[in-house]
Amino acid sequence: MSQANIKEIIKAEYIKCATDPIHFFRKYCYISHPIKGRILFHLYPFQEDVLTDFRNERFTIINKSRQLGISTLTAGYSLWTMLFSKDKTVLCIATKQETAKGMVDKVQFMYNNLPSWLRGNIKPLSDNKLSLKLANNSQIIATSAASDAGRSYAVSLLLIDEAAFIEGIDKIYTSIKPTIATGGGIIALSSPNGVGNWFHKTYAEAEIKKNDFKAIKLPWSLHPDRDEAWEQRERANMSSREFAQEYDCDFLGSGNSVVEPDTLSFYEETFIQDPIERRFMGGDFWIWQYPDYSKQYVVCADVARGDGSDYSAFHVIDAVSCEQVAEYKSQVDTRTFGNMLVSVATEYNNALLVVENANIGWDVVNTIIEKAYPNMYYSPRAYGEMQMDKWMAKMESEQTVPGFTTSVKTRPLVISKMESYIRDRQFTFHSKRLLEELRVFIWMHGKAQAQNGYNDDLVMSLGMGLFVRDTAMKFHAQSMDLSRQVIGGMTKTGIDGPVHHMPNGFQNPYQVEMGGQIEDITWLLG
């Protein structure tokens, strides 16, 4: 073969490597295997998918099982970026400098084992333990986590290794993000480390498309060499919580969550699904079921305080099957929120509208009153023991107030009711947003509340709805039964006279003769 032909073959192969990283990996990228030694990096199908996401997405966040080769894959992608692009800076941040250095070591090993025509027959300009710089001015730099990490670099690709374990990564991310604003990318990868940290929050928001990251979940079962026998061996050597965190990609709570993590995992696997429609500005109103005009619904709402740190939220619940059919969460002014609630409640068969009336909630309640909505919930001024006769007596008097009153007495009842419904799996919900709020809804200083930096707007609005369903609506239903019993008695005996018969011979059980006049008492049925 002539020299000219060899050059053409090399040129074509170089172009193919530059345009197809999977081809580059399969043919030229060597890795150091702990048992097999130096081997070609033969990609598994799930690794090819991840590599494709690296190319197509600027920001990726990977919730991964251990020992899937993702850190090595990321190192290979970093080398591919450096080789075939000029003036690229890859910055790797990890918990410790030694961990970050491991990423550079992997890149160094791959580079050293490339054929000379891919390396360009030119040694790196710099080659030390914490960086590797090529002749085309592309480089990778390793650094430990620090508040000023990366400030002095124009970063083309930021790697955050074991992101869930880096203390203060939220501040580091905030400081470094402007350096990639001109077009750089981010790859954040980690196994989970509980909830409430930057990695969990960013991943959870990515799943519901609330940020620019592509969420990738890689459990142990994706590896073709792992089967049930492997799983049994691993489980025998660790607790179920440890296995779930290390291999199942499960964001486990720290043991003080209001709802048990296992229960939430059941909901995630069984009921969580995408809405069939996203409505309103920003698509923040999620719908799983459209109104069924033979059903009764409850719309329960929590109103934002207005300080910018929380959200106005509401659920639409099927009152009979106790299933979430729609949900809203966003930051919106009170009048718009009130009008929205009236619109949605009307659409869902004039649903019972339950709105928290504390503080700024009064603005929403007043908007609903102004719209003359006919089915708003009114709270007794004092709940007491919540027995039916007492509740009905208060509702029939003037001892009520529009909206739901959250107090030191009712808040624990609301939370307890919500927890028991979910624990006993009597309530079905489909929302990923609600699931993530429940994961960080914890006992803190003896009070159930959202973990620092998170919100509980969906949780509290759900609690109010379930509490009302289990108290006021139940009592109302019992009072209707009593009314029907009374009506049944009147249809048999009449009051002050015989029961009125319709002209066609059929008896109308809801018309009676009282004092010589025919009275229709259908209104007693509500």
Image: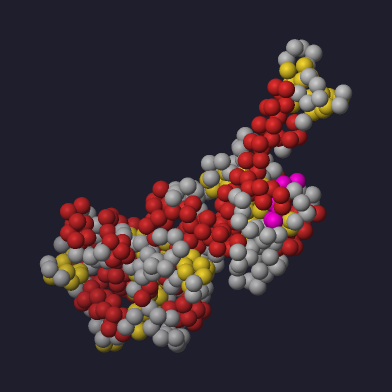
**Residue 316 in view here:** no
Q: Residue at x 68, y 60 (%)?
A: 382
Q: Which residue, as the protein is rendered here, is positioned at the far right?
A: 516
Can residue 83 be seen here? The reply is yes
Q: Quadrant of residue 358?
A: bottom right
| Image position of 457 with respect to 398: above or below | below
Q: Nearer the viewer, residue 351 or 404?
A: 404
Please state if 360 lies on the left or on the right of 3 as rendered.
Answer: right
Q: Is residue 379 magenta?
A: yes
The location of residue 240, given as percent across then percent down, is 28, 61
Horizontal and vertical percent position of residue 123: 24, 83
Residue 255 located left or right of residue 507 = left
Task: Residue 68: say if magenta.
Answer: no
Q: Which residues are magenta?
A: 374-380
The C terminus lies in quadrant: top right
**Quarter of the image containing the N terminus?**
bottom left
**Depth order, front residue of 50/303:** 303
Q: Please state the horizontal and vertical placement of residue 381, each as a whole percent of the image.
A: 71, 59
